[in-house]
Amino acid sequence: MADRTYNTLFICTGNSARSIMAEALLNHWGKGKFHTYSAGSHPKAEVDPLTIELLQQMRLPTEGLRSKDWDEFAGQDAPKMDFIITVCDNAAGEACPIWPGQPITAHWGFPDPAAAEGTIDDRRKIFAKVYRAIEARVKLFCALPVEALDRMAAQSGLHQLGQDEAVKA
């Protein structure tokens, strides 16, 4: 199982800053190990321009990044997720869809830089601070040994067997 790529979905409310940063960062730092997506429960019409500006300054690809509804990843034809991680304070308390395949879920709370007020320089500093916090968490996630990820995925699969109606007596 060591050559496996793990699908990961980062969820936030607006899918315009934190989850987009996390998507770009995990696709960068976890290249070959993770394939990453992001979505929101109430997506904004666009990715926050300061998010794009910061990602470009950090030399991370921004092509294809867009604000998406989490329903896009909840259907039968959506990619099967191994991990779903909420990255904002209020998304952890929202009623989430039932995700196919019983992925492993986690919550990494970060303040919303898109809600920051002040001058453009003040806002840029807040975006950079949140970016650094997300990047640190993503790097730790990427440093997990593949064997640990395989064990977590196997545990989720075993849990799924207990949930399947066809398997129950």
Image (cartoon, rainbow, N blue to C red):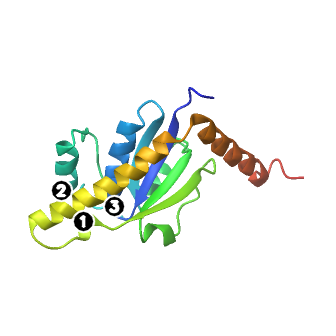
Would you name the residue on which mark 2 appears? 50
Horizontal and vertical percent for residue 90? 42, 71
Mark closer to the chain start, 2 or 3: 3
Identify the amino acid type marked 1.
Answer: Ala
Quadrant where the N terminus sits is top right
Query: Which residue lies at the image location 43% right of the left edge and 57% below the top edge?
Result: 11
Element marked by disc 2: helix
Query: Which residue lies at the image location 31% right of the left edge and 67% below the top edge?
Result: 112
Task: Determine which quarter of the picture holds residue 45.
Answer: bottom left
Mark closer to the chain start, 2 or 1: 2
Q: Nearer the viewer, residue 111 or 79?
A: 111
Label 3 Cα neighbours within 10 Å, binned few <14 / some 14-19 / many ≥20: some
Would you name the residue on which mark 1 appears? 114
The alpha-carbon separation of the residues under discs 3 and 1 comes to 13 Å
Q: Is residue 164 above or below residue 64?
A: below
Element marked by disc 1: helix
Horizontal and vertical percent for residue 4? 56, 30
User: 162 left or right of 146?
Assistant: right
The alpha-carbon separation of the residues under discs 2 and 1 comes to 8 Å
Query: Is residue 55 shown to the viewer in this render?
Result: yes
Mark closer to the chain start, 3 or 1: 3
Query: Which residue lies at the image location 75% right of the left edge and 54% below the top edge?
Result: 163
Label 1 Cα neighbours within 10 Å, binned few <14 / some 14-19 / many ≥20: some
Please report contact status of discs 2 and 1: CB closer than 8 Å, yes or no: yes
Query: Which mark's residue is nearer the viewer, 2 or 3?
Result: 2
Element marked by disc 3: loop
Would you name the residue on which mark 3 appears? 43
